[in-house]
């Protein structure tokens, strides 16, 4: 019997940190846990928390599998960008308030394992490619829709980073040059229409006329609490206002995805984040919009599917980016 | 002294065919000639013409350089798409009326040399990367603006083709989802605003109010003869209507280029075709629009420059794509 090797994955977000261990062949997952990020306590506290979560995951995995400490090859870290991958720096994160923070080496030193750093959207895409909805393909566009819209690109079987690790900002491509103002300062970005908060904004606008809707009931009339998940849920229950907002969302995302098909001619587009739970209400009209807008050869070559990895996507993806850089020896 | 090897390049267009020979190290160019395509006479006539132009280029190069017939390694062919590169087929060309035509092997058999086939926009981009405005870089977005807007992508130092050779359709990315109708059937494509004919259309619209303009004089009042080149020329001479059309063009192209910076984070964007002659009237406001719309790290990493290869771009690029597939032995 060959020894099983393990890699640890860290998914660092603005509000929570998730850590877990995975068998290096992707077959098994152990000790997946999340804790709040405690961003306000500063970078040292965050690193300390990550390190202790890694130690806990190693200990739990050793107990569950009988593995030895030296069966753990290293740590893949996924973090919001922009990053300097080669130097292992987080250049800046609005949510954490960091600047040029050497996250990779700090974590590596604390736990005594080799570490890698890549951005969260790249990790999510590589995870879906490794053991999720995009496995076995050569060219993948991954789109993660949450508070923002992030993107990851696998081209000719390799994660693509661009000239300075800034590629894949799919949320900040213009779909309407004179359209809605985006947080990035630009106008008409995809993110300004189809991020979670933008979906909630459009639902509030649709309700402003005082129409009857399940949405109002779901948040007990407090529309400021409305979230994209409510819209997907109400749509599934047949609520007219919600269904129209979902159809609109499908058209916006479909326009962005059609652009990406014409540019990349990918084998698969994976949509991850809350949107993956929206089901056919969203994916049906989204695919129809893409067929209307993109070239036929690109449409025929491409599946458009929800992500399969769910809540573990960030951790699985962080492990995948580690293994892309340091493949496990047989 | 080492023997100089040569590769032939064929640039097949809807109206003309250009053929030339180049030293495989990119140092010299020989026997560049163009003839009308004679599309109406059918595919066999076009192949025959290409073959005889290749023979003429070989003969002239042999005379000029003292090379022998077996110093010619092969033929790179650039053609309008869509293509099946691996099979060497032109799948369809609206201008030539071909369907699944085995262009590569027909030319190869006729001249007794190995041949490759790639689309014209990919060729143009690879040519600029080999010995033009993009040499020495890793990530290049090439945009060729003529009757249509084509694109070529060099990513991590390699031409990117996508899942079915359909990548790079940059002209057909939406910049305004409810905007101008495009020939492709979609709305708001970059090509609908900034192709040569679209630039001329917008100039005609600007003149519809009867304003005084050099443009009217240049075509002796026959506005149906107006072309993008007239607009660039009149703008350089200070004509107000033309200058505004050029500024608008810069904003449209700048919006498309900003999207590409956010997606690809390239080292360089090369704009080729007639637009390369437009000078700072166009490139100045275009760069300003990109700075306004794209993320700073992507803007800082990227030069936006006109192509350097001019009329020979297609032939040079065809030679470059041949050599990318079959590198010359030392």
Image (cartoon, coloured by chain):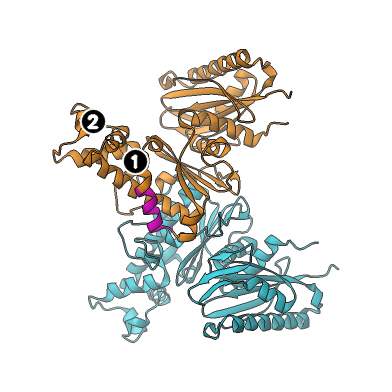
Chain colours: A orange, B cyan
Expressed as whole percent of the image width and height from the top left, the position of residue A2 reads 73, 24
Task: From the viewer's perspective, tell me whether residue B327 is left or right of residue A33.
Answer: right
Q: Which residue is depicted at the point 56% across and 54% down?
A: B163
Report the residue marked by disc 2.
Answer: A224
Q: Secondary structure at mark 1?
A: loop
Q: Position of residue B59 (x, y in %)?
A: 75, 83
Residue farthest to the right?
A: B1
Q: Nearer the viewer, residue B150 or B22?
A: B150
Q: Residue at x 44, y 62 (%)?
A: B171
| Mark 1–mark 2 distance (CA, rounded to whole Å) | 19 Å
Q: Position of residue A300 (x, y in %)?
A: 48, 56
Q: Quadrant of residue B256?
A: bottom left
Residue A163 higher or lower than A196, as above or below: below
What is the crowding at mark 2: few (fewer than 14 residues within 10 Å), some, or many (at least 20)? few
The residue closer to the viewer here, B88 or B229, is: B88
Q: Residue at x 46, y 38 (%)?
A: A307
Residue B255 visible in the picture: no
Q: Residue A47: x, y in percent? A: 52, 20
Residue nearest the viewer, comparing A181 with A73: A73
Q: Nearer the viewer, mark 1 or mark 2?
A: 2
Task: Report the span colored magenta.
Answer: A285-294
| Residue that numbered label 1 is attached to | A183
Question: Farthest left residue?
Answer: A210
Report the quarter where the N terminus of chain B lies.
Answer: bottom right
Specify whether residue B99 is in view.
Answer: yes
Overall secondary structure of the magenta section = helix
The image's mark for residue B208 is none
Residue drawn at the location 37% of the way across and 57% of the way down: B175
Point out the tag, 1 or 2, that comes first from the N-terminus.
1
Chain of the residue on which disc 1 is drawn: A
């Amino acid at each position: 019997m060959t020894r099983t090797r393990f890699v640890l994955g860290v998914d660092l977000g603005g509000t929570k940190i998730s850590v877990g261990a995975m068998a290096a062949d992707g077959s098994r997952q152990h000790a997946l846990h999340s804790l709040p990020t405690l961003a306000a306590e500063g970078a040292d506290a965050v690193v300390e928390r990550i390190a202790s979560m890694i130690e806990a995951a190693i200990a739990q995995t050793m107990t569950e599998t009988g593995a030895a400490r030296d069966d753990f090859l290293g740590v893949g870290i996924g973090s919001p960008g922009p990053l300097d991958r080669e130097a292992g720096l987080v250049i800046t994160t609005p949510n954490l308030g960091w600047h040029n923070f050497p996250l990779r080496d700090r974590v590596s030193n604390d736990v005594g394992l080799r570490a890698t750093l890549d951005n969260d959207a790249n990790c999510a895409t590589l995870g879906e490619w490794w053991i999720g909805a995009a496995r076995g393909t050569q060219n993948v566009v991954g789109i993660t829709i949450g508070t923002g819209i992030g993107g990851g690109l696998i081209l000719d079987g390799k994660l693509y980073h661009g000239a300075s690790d800034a590629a894949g900002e799919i949320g900040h491509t213009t779909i309407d040059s004179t359209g809605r103002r985006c947080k990035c300062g630009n106008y008409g970005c995809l993110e300004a229409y189809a991020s979670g908060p933008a979906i909630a904004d459009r639902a509030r606008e649709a309700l402003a006329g005082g129409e009857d809707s399940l949405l109002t009931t779901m948040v007990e009339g407090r529309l400021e609490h409305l979230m994209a998940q409510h819209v997907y849920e109400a749509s599934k229950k047949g609520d007219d206002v919600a269904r129209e907002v979902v159809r609109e969302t499908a058209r916006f995302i479909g326009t962005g995805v059609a652009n990406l098909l014409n540019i990349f001619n990918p084998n698969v587009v994976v949509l991850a984040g809350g949107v993956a739970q929206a089901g056919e209400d969203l994916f049906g009209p989204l695919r129809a919009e893409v067929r209307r807008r993109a070239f036929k050869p690109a449409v025929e070559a491409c599946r458009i599917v929800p992500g399969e990895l769910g809540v573990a996507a960030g951790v699985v993806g962080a492990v995948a980016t580690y293994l892309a850089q340091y493949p496990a020896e047989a």
